[in-house]
Image (cartoon, rainbow, N blue to C red):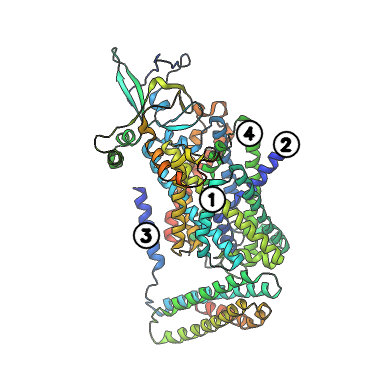
């Protein structure tokens, strides 16, 4: 991550007055949760754009092996990207994407206002759930 | 990187631990014999303690069974390991047969103990284990002498 | 009154839950081989785990996040993955050892070979994790572990010479023929057994499972500062009976049966039965904790939903990791490798992996971003740093000593 970014008045999110967020410190590798505290994913990478004034700003949070792989680099990173590609076919969906405007809070975790529409985020979880866990009796029972 | 170093170290350690190695000199063989006697002595003493608990009705049959069976098989392993080593020159043959004799006698007693405990004859155990006390002394003396 | 009950229950659970197969094996082995000459390691280890468990509990209560969750943020994804790999492997090995310990305890009670128990134990551990409520699970097996107090009773009954004992503990001397290197190797093993990484992962994740908040600080601290030291006393009792019965005879404890034998000699069938119950509860409880910890570490690195506080359907990958870890553990033990040997290796590898766990905790506990006002005070930082240095020394010395002493022979 090159430059610290302000979280400017992007859509609904308002930073506490005067607090500058550093994408590297406060966003990357942080847990993303929904309003109920349910865990969604980690911020594996961020999507950046350059504004007209030449300031870098964050437009989305990226998750999944396709996001983490390139960041990890090295043979391991390449392997992660390759696995994702194999599972989804060539030219796969790429990293899971959570638009920045969904963020409602940045604390010890990043809270987003709603379940992101991008289904690739839930890909592996859904696969494991339907193929394996669902088959075991008691999987849908109330929290134990 | 670190993972590979750890794996290599583990591999080396396992190799070292697993090597019985030939006995090159009489002294080496003598030390090996002494070490074997010590190990066997430990097994014999554990058996004696186990029988002590049996005699005082302080342990149930299942527990005694496991301990005595373990003792018997451990001693058998120790004996097999020792006898698998090539004695250096004919001088060492006496050493080999002396220790081998002690180990065999101890092994016989442990086998009998194991058979009796499985038959539930717990009361007879202390008497059967009688010879073990003498064998314990002899093994200890052997280890001392050849240390 | 309710509060008093809650605190007492917490303390009792912590005492009983402190000991696992690593502690059982390490303390008995060291007691039989060195008498009381390594007794000093236990308090050193206990202080260390108290210090860091309190930090982890504070992290969980203040930030609502578990420790491993935050390790990736602090170390970055590459180092975090390295940390995850090492921590997971050590935890998985420990899990296998605990499964072995449960099977050995069942063997001693039934004389049915432990190998036949292994698959059943693996299944039962999974079933309890799947079905039993977190708090209930902790309480049942924590309180069951209290049965290990019988070792303290047996120690008393065996009539130790207290003067001699204290002298030996404070003036450690080596028997002729014992090397310094082996002595320190076993010191490291004993230290590793007291400070196993999974304990802190579990403690902080458990804090999130039970939704700790600022109100829970008092209970958490009493569990740690009263419960763990008393658990340490249980460890010393196990060392003590081995020292009284086996050390004079020069016999090294290498089986679980030998470890339990002193209770039979001192207290008879009832004493032995209580001891076996305690061993079963302690190792089964530890199997649950290591199984869950295997899931916690992986899920918390990748950001997956984890925990028993949600339906299994909502934490599918987490439960899959636990299932696979249990299967791997069972398969390892079915290769007929000696469970005691597996335990010995698991505690030495724990000692090697300690810095990976404890350095990030110290850093996180000082970060106001997560902790708010509850950051480390000077006391925690001073002692935390001292222990970190100790941990680094231990970790660095472990492999050379293991090679030099051929793993303690």
Mark nearer the viewer, 4 or 1: 1
What is the CA distance from the residue labelled 4 to the residue labelled 2?
Answer: 14 Å
The residue at the far right in this view is C1
Are discs 1 and 2 located on one and the same chain? Answer: yes
Instruction: Specify whether residue C266 is in view.
Output: no
Q: Mark on residue C2?
A: 2
- Disc 3 sits on a residue from what chain? B
Are discs 4 and 1 located on one and the same chain? Answer: yes
Above or below for B62 versus B79? above
- Disc 4 sits on a residue from what chain? C
Residue pointed to by mark 4: C216
What is the CA distance from the residue labelled 1 to the residue labelled 2?
Answer: 31 Å
What is the CA distance from the residue labelled 4 to the residue labelled 3?
Answer: 46 Å
Mark nearer the viewer, 1 or 2: 1
Kindly indicate the quadrant of the structure image that contains residue C249. bottom right
> Which secondary structure, mark 2?
helix
Residue pointed to by mark 3: B11
Q: Mark on residue C127?
A: 1
Residue at 57% from the left image edge and 26% from the top image edge = C373
> Which secondary structure, mark 1?
helix
Mark nearer the viewer, 4 or 3: 4
Discs 1, 2 touching: Cβ within 8 Å? no
Q: Position of residue C50 (x, y in %)?
A: 59, 42
Above or below for C351 versus C216? below
Seen from the viewer's position, the closer of residues C334 and C36 is C334
- Disc 2 sits on a residue from what chain? C
Kindly indicate the quadrant of the structure image that contains residue B57. bottom right
Q: Position of residue C99 (x, y in %)?
A: 52, 56
Mark nearer the viewer, 3 or 1: 1
Seen from the viewer's position, the closer of residues C300 and C110 is C110
């Amino acid at each position: 991550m090159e430059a610290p970014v302000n979280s400017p008045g992007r859509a609904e999110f308002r930073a506490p007055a005067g607090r500058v967020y550093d994408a590297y410190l406060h966003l990357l590798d942080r847990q993303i949760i929904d309003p109920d505290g349910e865990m969604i994913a980690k911020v594996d990478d961020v999507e950046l754009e350059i504004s007209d004034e030449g300031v870098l700003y964050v437009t989305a949070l990226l998750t999944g092996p396709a996001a983490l792989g390139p960041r990890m680099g090295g043979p391991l990173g390449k392997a992660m990207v390759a696995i994702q590609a194999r599972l989804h076919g060539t030219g796969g969906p790429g990293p899971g994407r959570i638009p920045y405007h969904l963020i409602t809070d940045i604390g010890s975790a990043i809270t987003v206002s709603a379940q992101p529409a991008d289904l690739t985020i839930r890909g592996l979880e859904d696969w494991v759930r339907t193929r394996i866990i669902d088959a075991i009796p008691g999987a849908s029972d109330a929290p134990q | 990187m670190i993972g590979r170093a750890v794996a290599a170290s583990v591999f080396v350690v396992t190799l070292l631990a697993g090597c019985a190695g030939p006995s090159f000199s009489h002294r080496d063989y003598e030390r090996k014999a002494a070490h074997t006697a010590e190990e066997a002595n430990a097994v014999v003493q554990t058996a004696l303690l186990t029988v002590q608990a049996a005699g005082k009705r302080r342990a149930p049959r299942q527990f005694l069974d496991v301990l005595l069976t373990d003792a018997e098989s451990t001693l058998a392993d120790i004996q097999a390991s020792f006898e698998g080593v090539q004695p250096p020159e004919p001088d060492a043959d006496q050493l080999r047969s002396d220790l081998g004799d002690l180990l065999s006698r101890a092994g016989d007693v442990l086998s009998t103990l194991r058979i009796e405990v499985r038959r539930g004859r717990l009361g007879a155990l202390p008497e059967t284990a009688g010879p073990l006390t003498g064998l314990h002394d002899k093994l200890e003396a052997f280890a001392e002498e050849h240390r | 009154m309710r509060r008093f009950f809650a605190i007492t229950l917490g303390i009792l659970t912590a005492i009983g839950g402190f000991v696992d197969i690593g502690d059982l094996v390490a303390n008995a082995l060291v007691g039989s081989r060195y008498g009381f000459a390594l007794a000093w390691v236990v308090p050193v280890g206990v202080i260390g785990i108290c210090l860091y468990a309190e930090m982890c509990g504070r992290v969980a209560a203040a930030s609502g996040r578990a420790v491993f969750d935050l390790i990736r943020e602090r170390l970055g994804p590459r180092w975090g993955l390295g940390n995850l790999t090492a921590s997971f492997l050590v935890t998985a090995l420990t899990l296998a050892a605990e499964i072995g310990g449960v099977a050995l305890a069942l063997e001693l009670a039934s004389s049915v070979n432990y190998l036949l128990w292994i698959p059943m134990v693996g299944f039962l551990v999974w079933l309890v994790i799947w079905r039993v409520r977190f708090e209930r699970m902790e309480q049942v097996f924590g309180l069951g572990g209290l049965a290990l107090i019988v070792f303290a009773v047996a120690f008393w009954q065996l009539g130790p010479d207290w003067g001699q004992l204290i002298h030996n503990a404070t003036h450690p001397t080596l028997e002729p023929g014992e090397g310094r290197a082996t002595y320190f190797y076993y010191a490291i093993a004993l230290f590793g057994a007291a400070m196993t990484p999974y304990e802190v992962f579990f403690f902080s994740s458990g804090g999130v499972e039970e939704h700790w908040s600022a109100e829970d600080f008092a209970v958490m601290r009493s569990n740690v500062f009263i419960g763990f030291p008393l658990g340490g006393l249980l460890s010393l009792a196990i060392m003590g009976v081995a020292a009284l019965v086996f050390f004079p005879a020069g016999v090294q404890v290498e089986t679980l049966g030998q470890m339990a034998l002193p209770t039979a000699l001192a207290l008879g069938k009832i004493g032995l039965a209580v001891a076996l119950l305690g061993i079963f509860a302690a190792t089964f409880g530890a199997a649950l904790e290591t199984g869950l910890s295997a899931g916690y570490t992986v899920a918390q690195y990748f950001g997956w939903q984890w925990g028993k506080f949600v339906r299994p359907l909502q934490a599918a990958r987490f439960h899959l990791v636990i299932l696979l870890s249990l299967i791997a553990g069972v398969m390892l033990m079915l290769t007929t490798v000696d469970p005691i040997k597996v335990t010995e290796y698991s505690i030495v590898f724990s000692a090697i992996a300690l810095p990976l766990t404890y350095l990030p905790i110290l850093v996180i506990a000082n970060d106001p971003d997560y902790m708010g006002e509850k950051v480390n005070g000077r006391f925690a930082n001073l002692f935390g740093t001292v222990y970190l240095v100790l941990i680094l020394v231990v970790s660095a010395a472990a492999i050379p000593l293991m090679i030099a002493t051929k793993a303690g022979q």
